[in-house]
Amino acid sequence: MASLIERMPWLRRIDSRILLVFVVLVPALVAFGKLASEMMEGDTLAFDRWLLIHLRTPADPSVPIGPGWLREAMVDFTALGGGAVLTLITLLAAGYLLARRKAAMALFLTVAIAGGGILNTLLKYGFVRERPDVVPHLVEVSSASFPSGHAMNSAMVYLTLAALLARAERSWRVRLFLMSGAILVTLLVGFSRAYLGVHWPTDVMAGWSVGAAWACLASIVALQFQRSHTIEGPEPESDAAEDGAG
């Protein structure tokens, strides 16, 4: 009997496919350009205000909905998209690649993530949207609002790392786990920004959109470099042997 991978060869590239599916399913992918245009025209303000207000208790807008532990969890989740945490994760990942003697891949990863961070800064300076003022902020913020840096950078870092790590795995189950975990963390970080009242929901959607698209582009470029042997890391072999012939 043919193995699962032999019957369904698309599973060999399940990491790339999941990443592409995530890009398509992000609510903000009505196209970043259209979303930005509608935001600039004020067309998204009613939705933004409605959602932020409904994430707070009616009697006191300074209190978010849900139990007290949920607020604490959201503060912890939002830290996973902070600059210090993402920089540390990137440096650790690059160090791991260097230890594996994959210097070119470490350099590519660092440049890709740094480039995405620069893009986020440029977008913020370009749109200069004010932070939400309809509910009190539950954490300190200082930069412009659109697009959400936490949402964009977490999508970019976690999805890029998951995609690159998945390429080194032979098991499609491990690839599935890596990509699913990266998507979950990205969604939690983005939602936490709206829950804490420091970003308009459309800021988060835009951040997800651009960050996931950047991660997808980085994954595609890395794959092409690997195939041309410009950087280390040929594609893993099929894990048909792992599943057995049945």
Image: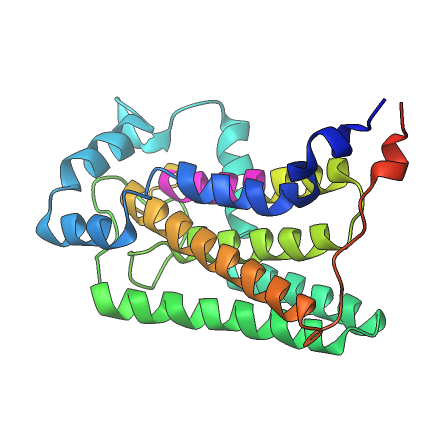
> Quick check: 147 left or right of 230?
left
Residue closer to the observer: 207 or 86: 207
User: Which of the image's four quarters has the C terminus?
Assistant: top right
Where is residue 70 shown, x and y percent of the image? 51, 29
Q: Residue at x 56, y 38 (%)?
A: 184
Q: Residue at x 23, y 69 (%)?
A: 126
Q: How is the image coloured?
A: rainbow
The secondary structure that most of the magenta stretch takes on is helix
Relative to 114, residue 42 above or below:
above
Q: Residue at x 81, y 50 (%)?
A: 237
Q: Is residue 202 magenta?
A: no
> Quick check: 7 left or right of 220?
right
**Residue 48 in which image quadrant:** top left
State the residue lying farthest toward the left: 41
Q: Say how many tags the image has.
A: 0
Magenta residues? 183-194
> Quick check: 121 left or right of 135?
right
**Residue 129 in which image quadrant:** bottom left
> Quick check: 155 left or right of 95?
left
Answer whether residue 205 is visible to the viewer in this image: yes
